[in-house]
Image: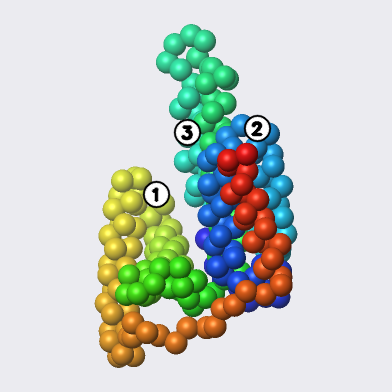
Amino acid sequence: MLGYEPGDSLAHRLDPRTKLAVQLAFAAAAFAHTDPRGLAMLTGVTALALASARLSPVSVIWGYRFLLPLLAAAVLFELVTLGPPWIELEAAADPLLASYRTLLIVAVAAGYVRTTPARESRAAVQWAVPGKPGRLLGAGVGLVFRFLPLLRRDLAAIRDAERARLGDERSTRERLETVGAAGLRRAFARADRLAMALSARCFSWNATLPRIRFRAVDVPAVLLAAGLGASMVV
């Protein structure tokens, strides 16, 4: 799974609110334009987003490779029938377009994750949602961005340890039970340490967040978000 990396790309210099606006407008446009022509247009926007973040499509596919079997299963479920003619190509057209649309949305989101620190995401959320609900939501967003990579790292370490002990020779059910139980123990242990660390650091609802402000570089991205939004009603 991809995570934030410091850099000086165009996407790194954009205001997080601008990137959130582009991401939301893109997702809405992707569900509004489900035909091949609309998805071709959105593919160009996705390529532009990845280029601005200096992120290659191959790294995105590899980082979110766990999604590919699920998307392929949705297509195969409609493609294969239990009787003649056994394979219906026309029935798989809509699931194929839907799976491709999901990949585009994930790719744009990957560009946001790679170029936006968790603190800036929290600041953007608290700006959009005022009051205590915004502070709660912003803190949750920040913790998720920090917590998920650690859980994924723990699961990978558990899986490697299981393989080193010839655990890959066990049945699938036994491996799932072992990895799942150990993963849950690690997750709860990390949650306990996180709660203790927040208490020790006097976790505040009014944390000092980085200053975010719109700049000239945000103008093209804002216009892109507005264009995506307008395309849904034109």
Whether residue 147 appears in this view of the structure is no
**Whole-percent x and y of residue 176?**
33, 51
Q: Nearer the viewer, mark 3 or mark 1?
A: 3
* Residue at 41% across, 56% down: 166
Amino acid, disc 3: Ala
* Residue 20 percent coordinates (x, y): 54, 62
Query: Which quadrant would residue 5 be assigned to in this image?
Result: bottom right
Quadrant (top left, top right, bottom left, bottom right) of the C terminus? top right
Q: Which residue is mark 1?
A: 169
Badge 3 element:
helix
Question: Disc 3 versus disc 1: distance between alpha carbons?
Answer: 29 Å
Under tag 2, what secondary structure? helix
Foreground pick, 133 / 11: 133
Residue 82: x and y, percent? Answer: 42, 15
Badge number at residue 5: none
Going from the N terminus, do you reach mark 3 or mark 2 first?
A: 2
Mark 2 crowd level (few <14, some 14–19, many ≥20, 10 Å Cα): few
